[in-house]
Amino acid sequence: MKVTIIGGGIIGLSSAFYLQRSGWDVTVLDKGDFTDNCSYGNCGYICPSHFIPLATPGIVKKGLKWMWNSKSPFYVQPRFDWNLINWGLKFIRSATRDHVKNAAIPLRDIAIISKKEYEEWLGLPGFDFAYEQKGLLEIFQTEAGGEHAKHTVEKAHELGLNDTRLLSKEELTAMEPQTRINGLGAILFNCDAHCYPNKLMQQLNAYLKQKGVKFIPNEEVVGFEKAGKKVNKVVTADKNVFEADEIIIATGSWGRETAKLLGTRIPMMPGRGYSVTLENSSYNVNYPAVLLEGRAAITPMDGNKIRLGGTMEITSHKTPPRMNRVQGILDAVKRFYPDFDVPFPPKEKIWYGYRPCSADGLPYIGRIKKYDNVTIATGHSMLGLSLGAGTGKMVDEIVNNKKTSMDISFFDPLRFS
């Protein structure tokens, strides 16, 4: 039995991993060459702590405030675009306290499953992706940030993440004795881990090829051939045709367009993020950290690297990158780590990619109604790598008609229909 996976990021390759293991003949198509999608340039977090979705009451207020500042951490490019308007209205309606409360358990569950799966991968030949469980800091600089941290710790404990604790300024300083930190305190999420995404993706790619998974680069899907309630062929821009018994749509931020080819509408927008990786830097950090008010992140990874990343730019794939947003990241890091005088890097040293942002901050994982053999797996926003292995496991369970390892009804791709 053949399965064709459209999309070669962490979600597509994780799906390939589990489907190959369960006996499927797997082909992965990608519009690029599998070497530089959004799964490579992120900050490497594998984080059960991220149980708060992107769609929150606070982010709507801040987003409206920041809309006219293209350097702001959460920037929506003003323009007339029906897809953006539709997404934005649904995002605003989703950004409620009830939604935040209801999203916490499914986000926690899939992250815990994913983390466990990644740890099992480390026991397989060829996998050594600089995985470390040091925990994750969330550093705050203001009294309001401290109040937010207090409530987050309380919520983490309610969710069973009991190794989460609030750190004083002195405790934070003791954890990073080599580096000055400008913060009033921090949350320490001991449940979190991190890795070097580049190694993870390269090793996963090599492992799957060794297992017989076929990788077809530079094939943009433009159509499908159907027979009744089945999709039996995938058609690409080069007029190549791939037969399949099952189809997985894991096209990341292009997922809306791919799903539309099958008459299915999922509200989603590309959210561009940027990162800069310092190698053999003179700066030292022991722990990965989210900088709360700066909306940026910093991760020591792979022994000799520090990655600085962040920002969310709701834009189109055709909009040229705004390099001033990279300066926003560097400025945020400088405010929290005052000794970090990182010069603006040359353009070739700046990575950017498009995160698939759903209208409520939850991924889309599940079957579509029009066809019996199509599964969607996209919309993970900033959590693609964190939830990658867990999503791949769910896709395999869906395709093989097994009971899923958790309740995925919250991730229904048709929940906005």
Image: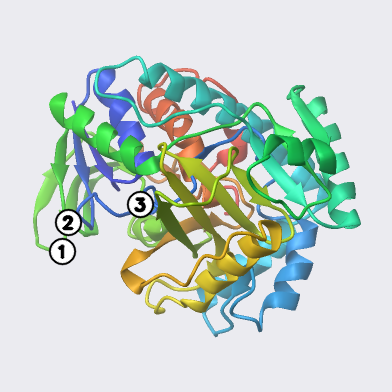
Q: Position of residue 414 (x, y in %)?
A: 53, 48
Horizontally, residue 398 falls left or right of residue 232, namely right
Q: Quadrant of the N terminus?
A: top left
Residue 208, compared with residue 65, is above or below; it is above
- Give the CA distance from mark 2 to mark 3: 12 Å
Q: Amino acid at mark 3?
A: Thr
Residue nearest the observer in this picture, 370 or 196: 196
- Per the image, label 1 sits on a secondary structure element best described as loop
Label annotation for residue 219? 2
Q: Are dots 2 and 1 in contact, CB under 8 Å?
A: yes
- Per the image, label 2 sits on a secondary structure element best described as loop
Q: Position of residue 87 (x, y in %)?
A: 59, 66
Label 2: few (<14), some or many (≥20) within 10 Å?
many
Horizontally, residue 370 falls left or right of residue 227, namely right
Residue identified by numbered label 1 = 237
Q: Position of residue 409 (x, y in %)?
A: 60, 34
Q: Amino acid at mark 1?
A: Ala
- Give the CA distance from mark 2 to mark 1: 7 Å
- Give the CA distance from mark 3 to mark 1: 15 Å
Residue nearest the observer in this picture, 30 or 248: 30
Q: Position of residue 359 (x, y in %)?
A: 60, 58
Residue identified by numbered label 3 = 251
Front: mark 3 or 1: 3
Horizontally, residue 50 falls left or right of residue 199, namely right
Residue 377, picture quadrant: top left
Residue 152, picture quadrant: top right
Residue at x 59% of width, y 80% of height: 70
Front: mark 2 or 1: 2
